[in-house]
Image (cartoon, rainbow, N blue to C red):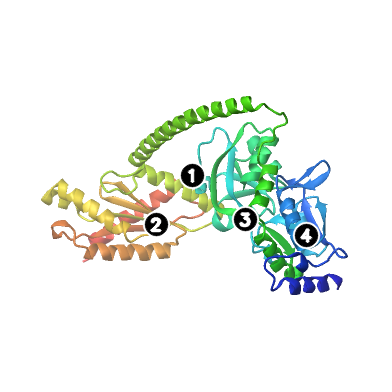
Amino acid sequence: MKKMILLFLLLLTFSHATPLSTAEMPVTNKSPLKCISTGEWAPFNLIENDKLTGIGLDYWYLIENKLNIKSHCSLAKNWTEVLTSIKNHTADITIATQNTQKRSEYAVFSKPYVRYPIVIVTKNDTGFIDDINLLRDRTIVVGKNYATVDILKKHYPLLHLKYVGSIDEALKQVNDSKAFATIGILPVVAYKLNRHAFPNLKISGSIRPYFSLSIMVRKDYAALLPLINKAIDTISTKEKDEINKKWITLRYEEKISRKYFYALLIGSGILFLFFMAWLYLLKKEISRKNKTTKELERLVTIDTLTSVCNRYMFDSTLDKEIALYRRHGLALSLIFFDIDGFKHINDIYGHKVGDTILKELATLVSEHIRTSDTFCRWGGDEFIIILPNTTEVYAQKLSENLDHLIRKAPFTHHISLSCSFGVTQFREEDTHLSLMSRIDYLLYDSKNMDTESP
């Protein structure tokens, strides 16, 4: 009851006050807030000299002083205990976390007071990862109940996540090749890599969105939020710089002469200029190689005539989609089709016109399928479409729609086209080979039916 009266008085005192002034500061020494944190999230929360400290605590002390309130921060064994304490009202706040839908059921959150990128950590022999979806078939180890897990589940639901107790354990599993990568917040990851001797690990990429840090408050203490937000707004650039200097900048233990300092400064400047020149040349070379690599990839995976995927790309993509089916059970279907009487077109109009027909057909079909579908030229006048997360019923309707569009389309020389279609859905007992055998038979059967019909 005492704390509820306190919260009411705090809200009443600050509801019309900007900025915070000495006269407005309520006296709350009689009822300090119960803060809880772990010492396992350096540099935000960590233990130094047997004391809980870190970036999060420094920001909280600023807020505490601006509000003229008192709190007592206790140490939890792990992050799960922190969340449980807030949920069960045995603690009032925690100082460095992120708002998630699940946590919003029992807590409220201040506006963010800082934000950082989320990064991917792998072994040194892994190249730069510019798309996290490339890791769909890899094991990614993350800390259980960490807010980054909710971000990954929301934005990248197909990732294969393995849960451990802490970021230290996650880094160790990547280091020991028990997982391919871990994902965490940049300052935390950088701190761990620098302090815990992981010479075999590196940061290989980053993802969106950024990670924002807020104050988490038990839900029945929501009246505190306007006060905390007001205090966050009054944190000056100077105060933020002081926190950054404390935790980020290098500390020099020895005094050096001014003459030596200037010599060191000039030498550093020259080295910096050489470094920038080298970096420019390196970027130029990387850009050239990337351009060459992309062109080679295009030549390997794209059909040069129609500009759709080739047979090599089809086989690779189908294997990946079958693996996803095995893992997630999502429906997978194929449409296999060819042009009726295409040899007759080549014989009458010539192969150049036949090539134009193939390009026009490929363009038409590409414009009427989903971006998630993979459209390939199988060979000659045969084409195939991979339809992920699609049942045979939908695939059949799509083939009928494509058949109608092709029959009505104005192809070069006013040539009328029709196609035969085979449609099937991947089955539990299927393999790559059995699926292709079945759809090949269905296309053959479809052509025979067209030939026999009046």
What's under tag 4, amino acid-wise?
Answer: Thr
Q: Where is residue 123 in the image (x, y as percent from the top left)?
A: 59, 35
Q: Which amino acid does label 2 sit on?
A: Thr
Q: How crowded is mark 1: few (under 14 residues within 10 Å), some or many (20 or more)?
A: few
Q: Of label 1 and label 4, which has the lower sequence position? A: 4
Sequence-wise, the earlier of marks 4 and 3 is 4
Q: Disc 1 versus disc 3: distance between alpha carbons? A: 22 Å
Q: Earlier in the sequence, mark 4 or mark 2?
A: 4
Q: Is residue 370 visible?
A: yes
C-alpha distance separating marks 4 and 3: 21 Å
Q: Between disc 2 and disc 3, whose residue precedes?
A: 3
Quadrant of the frame with the C terminus: bottom left
**Tag 1 residue:** 130
Contact, mark 2 vs mark 3 (Cβ under 8 Å)? no
Instruction: Give the residue at the far front of this rendering.
Output: 259
Picture coordinates of residue 231, whole percent (x, y): 70, 62
- What's the residue type where badge 3 is placed? Ser
The residue that label 2 is drawn on is 371
* Numbered disc in front, either 1 or 3: 3
Of 327 and 240, the residue lying toward us: 240
Q: Is residue 450 shown left or right of residue 316?
A: left
**What residue did someone put label 3 on?**
212
Rendered location of residue 53, percent (x, y): 77, 47
